[in-house]
Image (cartoon, rainbow, N blue to C red):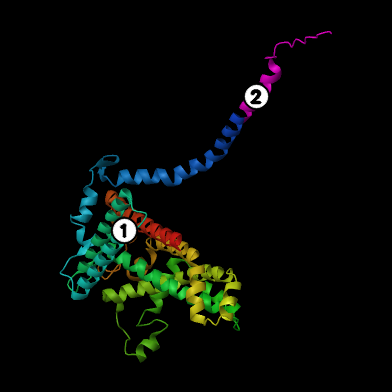
Amino acid sequence: MSTSVTTQGPTPTGSGLEAPSRIARIQARLDSVAGSAFIMPAVLVVLLLSIFPLIVSLYVSLTRLQFVKGGFQLTFVGLDNYAKLVVGIDKDHFLGVFSNPAPIGWLLFGLVVVWLAVWLARFVRGPNFSIGGLVSRLFSGLVISAGAWLIARTLSPEGRPGTVVVTLIYVFTGLVVQYVLGLCLAVLCVQQIPGRRFFRVVFLLPMMITPVGVAYLFRMLADTSKGPFYPVWDMLGLSNTSWATNAWSARAAVMIGDIWQWTPFMFIVLLAALESQSVEAIEAAVVDGANRWQIFWAITLPGILPVSSTLILIRMIEAFKIMDLPNILTNGGPGTATESLTLHAYTIWRTLDIGGSAAVAYMLLFIVTFVGVSYANEIRRRLSEA
């Protein structure tokens, strides 16, 4: 009986096994560096065009422009520019003239407070309660209550709304009317009716005109002395009537022009959403005996809710920047009755108050951010509960 013993040599630790692992590590590092190298140009562009101007404008809003020998200098004044808008000499322009609310104002303010109380109570009793969520909702409720109180006091018979309230009127009135009109036109154009392709093109024409062109167009149409509609105004007994001397008629003219221009944007997006809906659910509802209204409220409208929420958010952000229509159509008048926040900032900028103009722009940024984030959170909550 023979026994054989096999002796294995030592495991090689040379370059044969270590080289592949080292190469793999080098390749991983190169891949990460390559990814950063490809992303860096886009990051630099975003920083240059978005973040850097925001930081610079924030600093400018805390300064005051002074002309000195050989040029100018920016003197740091802290929050003085913001204080001037809220409690200073520009308060009536920015916030408006306060007065005791009318009964309808008290009623609307009370409804807002009751709705906020119910909203907070539902959250406290709900399964998603948290301290952080409660704090954020208390802050939102406080801001909304202050906004409702501001609207109630400045829209009273003896009050006068400032550029903040006027901008909110433009935004939310325009959004509601534009969405309803756009949805009605979209529902109409998905029906099998003669000429629907022609009207699809016609409805898009206002969106192809620049805001400046729309402003001049409505300025001519609203001319009651020598405009193209003069025979109509004369027949109605309104010839040579200056509609621009009344605050609400001037605001209505601005809102009509804005609605006319931006309703096609709502229309084309909602039309695409309606045409992309599945017909199986609608056919099943028809078989079950549902009428048109039941199908619209139970199937069509919930089906386009995600698209509608995004569409409203985009249009709302854009509506806060309205400037061309009130500037050209009414020049912000009568007085400052039709002046938006963007036009307010531009007006101050023309007087070389650079810090005050930047402060108004940042106040607009705060308002848009608050409204947009609150709306997005509410829509996200409703979609998650659906």
Is residue 174 rendered magenta in the image?
A: no
Q: Residue furthest top?
A: 2
Mark 1 burial class by Cα count in 10 Å: few <14, some 14-19, many 20+? few
Residue type, mark 2 in image: Ser
Residue 61 coordinates in the image, percent (x, y): 29, 47
For label 1, the residue is 125
* Picture layout, residue 292 above or below residue 304: below
Is residue 7 rendered magenta in the image?
A: yes
- Please name the residue shown 37% across and 63% down the image: 323
- Please name the residue shown 45% across and 42% down the image: 47
Q: Residue furthest front?
A: 1
Residues drawn in magenta: 1-27
Where is residue 137, by image quadrant?
bottom left
Residue 74 coordinates in the image, percent (x, y): 28, 42
For label 2, the residue is 21
Task: Specify the label residue 94 is tagged with.
Answer: none
Q: Residue furthest right?
A: 1
Location of the N terminus by quadrant is top right
Q: Is disc 2 placed on a helix, strand or loop?
A: helix
Residue 341 coordinates in the image, percent (x, y): 31, 60
Q: Is disc 1 placed on a helix, strand or loop?
A: helix
Mark 2 burial class by Cα count in 10 Å: few <14, some 14-19, many 20+? few
